[in-house]
Image: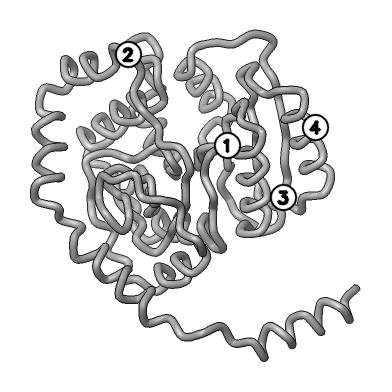
Amino acid sequence: MSGSVVVIPACSDENALDACLAALDAGTLPGTRVWIPDNAAVTPRGFEIIKAWIARTKLKADYTRRQSRTDELVNMAEIFRAVGDADVCVLSPFAVPTRGWLTRLEACLAADPSVATATPWSNLGDILSWPLMGELNALPDDPQAIAQAAANMPRLFPEIPAAVPHCVLVRGKARAAVGSLDADSFSSWYAGLVDWSMRFAGLGWRNVLCESSFVGCTLESHAHEGDAAALFARWPAWQDRQAHFVLNDPLRSNRHALTQRLQELTPPDLQRDLFDAIGDERAA
């Protein structure tokens, strides 16, 4: 069982939410705490999908709904206040988690106490996009194969300018040190996370890539109108730092190594799969 709380802010896209929950169930340890906060966005069919999923999942899941919609970052700030000092993994409802995704993110925090945020690879991961950085790469046909290739990547935890919203694990101690999300200055989770990342870094914490974890995604997050200007006003060096990272591409070798490992994967062990199936039948 995981020690973190997984938060999936619910959305109105029923198909995306259904796919996210199914992948979460398949790739996450039983008993992991999951919270689906609904900012008055879920449709009636979406609610039925969530209710049915909670009834059958082996995860420890809860769903809550606001009576009326509020700003995205106001909602996120309330969510983080509600979970106290726990480590929290925010997973986009458009994400497609893979087997072992959260275990590897948690191992990143456990290995380096200076890490405030750990973010996995994704096809839509902005500066952490694979196979091409900054591109809207299509969701791979077999995300599990990417996860298998990433699982044995060297755990170097390279530092990145800021965490990326498709999936991020945030250390509770770091949150306690820097304070809450600034919902007065920003409106999007994207901008609030960048601001948080910069504040973490200012106090000596690290925002890193967890190169052994991969989480697919079908829709990229963006800053809301006015957020970019507010970020640049507060953090004048932010734009140059981001541009420098993109131009120098310090993760080029990491992405290449992941691609190589994927190409070197051997075919699935069909006999082992057969034995697993036999074991499942006996257990039933």
**In terms of secondary structure, where does tag 4 sit?**
helix
Using the rendered image of the protein, determine whether residue 88 is visible from the camera's viewpoint: no
Q: Residue at x 67, y 15 (%)?
A: 66
Separation of marks 4 and 2 at Cα, in angstroms:
33 Å
Specify which label sits upstream in the sequence, 4 or 2.
Answer: 4
Label 2 is placed on what type of residue? Glu
Which element is circle 2 on?
loop
Q: Which residue is mark 1?
A: 7
Which percent across, then down, holds residue 89?
A: 50, 42
Residue occupying the point 37% across, 82% down: 264
On screen, residue 252 above or below 167: below
Q: Is residue 264 visible?
A: yes
Label 4, label 3: how many angstroms apart (C-alpha)?
18 Å
Looking at the image, is mark 3 or mark 2 nearer the viewer? 2
List the residue tagged with mark 3: 59
Which badge, 3 or 2, is on the more N-terminal residue? 3
Marks 3/2 in contact by CB < 8 Å: the verdict is no
Of callouts 4 and 3, which one flags the residue occurring earlier in the amino acid sequence? Answer: 4
Residue on which disc 4 sits: 48
Per the rendering, the mark at residue 225 is 2
Instruction: Give the SS element for disc 1.
Output: strand
Q: Amino acid at mark 4?
A: Glu
Q: Colour scheme in the image?
A: one colour
